[in-house]
Image: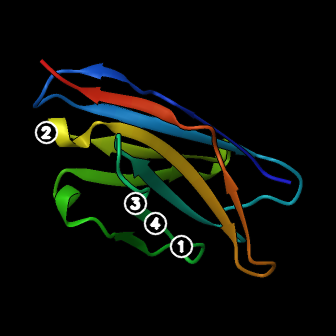
């Protein structure tokens, strides 16, 4: 079982930055065995993937709306991944979820999410 805990959300003005963290724990968890992703769900919209960091280390930013503004990184020693969000716009307002996918067993794990509100 994998536990994911997101943090770092809050209210921020347009144009500002925010960094989200996702701490992973649980028996057997390593970044080498799990693909890690950030998703978000805006009010009234479906959940969408923002970025994925594959277990082999390839980083993919899949949302065109966040390219050149969001970056993903990880700290293996802390079992934590980060989502650095720059130049935030109101459309980035959403609940951001951390996801860990274990391909060998086709199992998904989710955090409870952290709310990001971009507003002046």
Of all residues, the one furthest to the front in this rendering is 44
**Tags 3 and 1 in contact by the CB under 8 Å rule?**
no
The C terminus, quarter of image: top left
Residue 88: x and y in percent read 18, 37
Q: Secondary structure at mark 2?
A: loop
Residue 83: x and y in percent read 39, 46
Q: Secondary structure at mark 4?
A: strand
- Say which mark, if any, is on residue 54: 1
Horizontal side, residue 65 vs residue 54: left or right = left
Q: Earlier in the sequence, mark 3 or mark 1?
A: 3
Number of numbered discs overlaid on the protein picture: 4
Residue position marked by numbered label 4 in the rendering: 52
The N terminus, quarter of image: bottom right
Horizontal side, residue 107 vs residue 21: left or right = right
In this rendering, which labeled residue sits more in front, label 4 or label 3?
3
Separation of marks 2 and 3 at Cα, in angstroms = 19 Å
Kindly indicate the quadrant of the structure image that contains residue 85. Answer: top left
Quick check: 41 above or below 66? above
**Tags 1 and 4 in contact by the CB under 8 Å rule?**
yes
């Amino acid at each position: 079982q994998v536990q994911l805990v997101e943090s770092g959300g809050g209210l921020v003005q347009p144009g500002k930055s925010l960094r989200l963290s996702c701490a992973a724990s649980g028996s057997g968890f390593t970044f080498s065995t799990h693909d890690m992703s950030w998703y978000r769900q805006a009010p009234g919209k479906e959940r969408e993937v923002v970025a994925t960091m594959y277990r082999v280390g390839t980083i993919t930013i899949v949302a065109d709306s966040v390219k050149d503004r969001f970056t993903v990184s990880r700290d293996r020693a802390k079992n934590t991944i980060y989502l650095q969000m720059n130049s935030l716009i109101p459309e980035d307002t959403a609940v951001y979820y951390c996801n860990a996918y274990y391909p060998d067993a086709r199992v998904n794990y989710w955090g409870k999410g952290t709310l990001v509100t971009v507003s002046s």
